[in-house]
Structures are given as structure tokens and as C-alpha cells.
Amino acid sequence: MFRLVYNLSITLKKMMNMSTEKFHVGKAVIRLVQGDITEQDIDAIVNAANSSLMGGGGVDGAIHRKGGPKILEECKRIRATEWPNGLPTGKAVITSGGNLKARYVIHTVGPIWRGGNHGEPELLAEAYRNSLKLATSKGLKTVAFPSISTGAYSYPVEKASRIAIATVKEFLETEDKLDMVVFVLFTRHDFEVYRNAAKEIL
Ligand code: AR6
């Protein structure tokens, strides 16, 4: 009996982790998956970083932990050369993927939620747009995003998901160099929220 319940819970967990949804925009695909972005085998994953580029908690911490010290070294170089005062909100930079399966990490800074009247929607859209622009300028074809700003930066996920999906859609409509954009949502709840937004917008 214990074994049956145990096996059932493993199967259910696997099924939950396998949640995935696919949408088409032009010749590109937008895919939503529930999971861990550090496991993605893809050209580039996007890091929801902070201006320091020196790492932190959440997805940033997970990427640096799994990616190893090479990523931080490259971030330090970027700070020393391009952005001595830190990477401004909405901008993006790129490093290698270190020990990750992903070839590159694009680091961007989402806005901290301060009620919504401090330019947060436009800055969040900029973070997505500049990450995508950087990916295409490097000739990359596939990019995975986490839900930028909706963790430590407290952006309400219902609002953020609409901006994320609409911004990626707009980008793919005006530019046909990317094959696939994946949103990797860490929790079942976030996956459902993004799926609802995608069904409405795409
Ligand atoms: N894979 C996918 N998504 C993840 C993962 C993962 N491994 N880990 C967390 N998330 P956050 P922010 C989700 O806080 O709100 C950092 O300290 C998480 O559940 O990582 O942009 C930085 O250094 C949430 O849905 O990023 C900054 O200081 C989403 O990723 C600050 O947090 C974003 O949560 C940035 O805050």
C-alpha cells in the first residue's frame, strides 16, 4: 500500500513537472513550462539579476551556483568595463553559461514593484525587449526567461505575465530571427497564471 501511494505521488509529481504549453507567433514558438531554468538545454537563459551583477538569491543565486565562478568573473569584467555604476533597470548584458547546459546567460534587471506608477510596466517590458535584442544580435535562436521581478522584487505575477507575453509576442512579430522563446515558471501557480495570460494574448 505504502509503495503504491509512493509510486503514485512520484508519477503525479512528474506529471506536474512536465506541464508544458505551446503557442505559435509567426514562424516562432512560445513555450511555457513549469520547472527550473538552470536545467534548460537552450542557447541562452535569462537571469533576473540586480544592478550589481554580483549574484543574489532566487533565480540569480541558482544560476550562479550551478553555472560556477566563470559567470561571476565575466560579470565582474562587465562591471569594470561597461557598467561601473551597475547595470540600470531594464538593460541587459551577456556572459557565457559556465557549467550550465545553456550556452549563454543574459543578465537583466527587472523593476522593483512600487505600486505600479513608477514606470514599472515599461521597465519590465524593456528588460524582456533588451534581452531578446541581445540574443538576436548574437545570432542566438532559442531563449528561456524566468518570471522577471515577480519574486524578491514583488511585481504582481498576473500583471507581470501579461507584459512578459505581450512584449515577447510583439518582438517576434517584428523580427523573425528567433525560433523559440520559453518561459520557465518555477511554481504550478505561476505556470497557470502565465498560461491564462498567453491564452488571452496569443
Ligand atoms: N528557475 C526558474 N524560476 C525560478 C528559479 C529557477 N531555478 N528560482 C526562482 N525562480 P527572483 P526578481 C523564480 O526573486 O523578483 C535576486 O536576489 C521565482 O519563483 O529570482 O526579479 C536578484 O539578485 C520567481 O517567480 O527575481 C535580485 O536582487 C522568479 O524566478 C532580485 O532577486 C523571479 O524571482 C531580483 O528579484
Image (cartoon, rainbow, N blue to C red):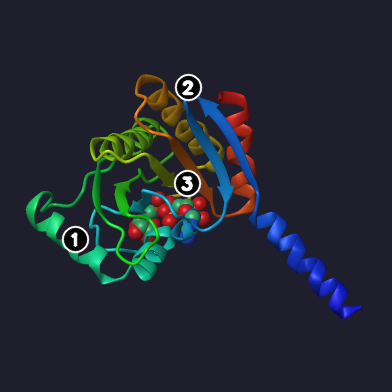
- Percent position (x, y) of residue 65? 37, 70
Label of residue 74 in the image? 1
Q: What residue occupies the far bottom of the structure in this picture?
A: 2
Label 1 CA crowd tier, 10 Å (few <14, some 14–19, many 20+):
some
Q: Secondary structure at mark 3?
A: loop
Give the position of the N terminus as an image quadrant: bottom right
Q: Secondary structure at mark 2?
A: loop
Name the residue nearer the viewer: 193 or 172.
172
Residue 80: quarter of image: bottom left
Q: Secondary structure at mark 1?
A: helix
Q: Earlier in the sequence, mark 2 or mark 1?
A: 2
Give the answer, above or below, for where 53 lies relative to 194.
below
- The residue that label 3 is drawn on is 147
Q: Earlier in the sequence, mark 2 or mark 3?
A: 2
In this rendering, does residue 179 appear at all?
Answer: yes
Task: Look at discs 1 and 3 and give the one toward the viewer.
Answer: 1
Tell me the distance, in whole angstroms, between the alpha carbons under discs 1 and 3: 24 Å
Give the answer, above or below, for where 63 lies relative to 19.
below
User: In the drawing, does residue 126 fall left or right of residue 147?
Assistant: left
Tell me which amino acid carries mark 2.
Gly
Name the residue nearer the viewer: 23 or 82.
23
- Percent position (x, y) of residue 122? 35, 30
Tell me the distance, in whole angstroms, between the alpha carbons under discs 2 and 1: 35 Å
User: In the drawing, does residue 126 fall left or right of residue 93?
Assistant: right
Question: Which residue is at 59% across, 47% downward?
Answer: 190
Residues at discs 2 and 3 in contact (Cβ within 8 Å)? no
Q: Is mark 3 within 8 Å of ligand 1?
A: yes
Label of residue 26 in the image? 2
User: In the drawing, does residue 165 fall left or right of residue 60?
Assistant: right
Tell me which amino acid carries mark 1.
Glu
Question: Which residue is at 76% across, 63% downward?
Answer: 11
Question: Which residue is at 76% across, 60% downward?
Answer: 12
